[in-house]
Image (cartoon, rainbow, N blue to C red):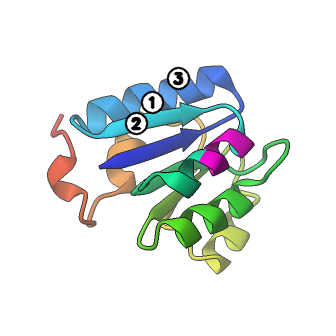
Amino acid sequence: MLFAAVDPNKKDLKQLVKFLKSSYPGCKIVMFCNPLAAAGYVRSHPVDVLFTEIAMTGMSGFRLKEITEKCNPGALTVFISATAAYAMDALNCRVFDYMVKPVTPEKTRNALKETKFQPFIQKN
């Protein structure tokens, strides 16, 4: 399984990746601070899940979701934001899950519960 994590805040990105690694051991995780670099990556790699901040310079998480799902049909997107302000827009675009910061180990484990990724979740 291949996860892409995108957040322009390096501290938040490192924390997210740390929690993803502990929650989904054995899954490959690539990380990006730049959404344009992430978009280039997902165009040529079979990403299964995109974890992305919504508000970013250069490209929104909404646009990155569109690109990811167009290039990787069946990919799931989990939005991450410091606020719930985008929640209705996220629901309207059929995002799989929405996490409000701060991200926690429990939130990362619960994000993909009841999906095909269930067998990969580390029981803590």
Residue at x 84% of width, y 45% of height:
58
Q: CA distance from mark 3 to mark 2?
A: 11 Å
Mark 1 crowdedness (10 Å alpha carbons): few <14, some 14-19, many ≥20: many
Mark 3 crowdedness (10 Å alpha carbons): few <14, some 14-19, many ≥20: some
Sequence-first disc among 3 and 2: 3
Q: CA distance from mark 3 to mark 1?
A: 5 Å
Point out the frontmost of discs 2 and 1. Answer: 2
| Residue type at tag 3 | Lys
Name the outermost residue toward the bottom: 92
Mark 2 crowdedness (10 Å alpha carbons): few <14, some 14-19, many ≥20: some
Residue pointed to by mark 3: 14
> Is residue 65 or residue 78 the one in the foreground?
65
Residue 101 x/y as whole percent = 60, 39
Number of the label disc, if any, that sits on residue 17: 1
Marks 3 and 1 close (CB-CB < 8 Å) = yes
> Is residue 36 or residue 62 the one in the foreground?
36
Residue at x 52% of width, y 40% of height:
5
| Residue type at tag 1 | Val
Number of the label disc, if any, that sits on residue 74: none
Residue 24, by quadrant, is top left
Residue range of the region highlighted in magenta in the rendering: 36-40
| Residue type at tag 2 | Ile
Q: CA distance from mark 2 to mark 1?
A: 7 Å
When the figure is inspected, residue 70 is found, relative to residue 60, above or below; the finding is below
User: Left or right: where does residue 110 sit relative to residue 91?
Assistant: left
Residue at x 14% of width, y 54% of height:
119
Residue 108, by quadrant, is top left
Sequence-first disc among 2 and 1: 1
Dominant secondary structure of the residues highlighted in magenta in the image: helix
> Is residue 62 or residue 91 the one in the foreground?
62
Residue pointed to by mark 2: 29
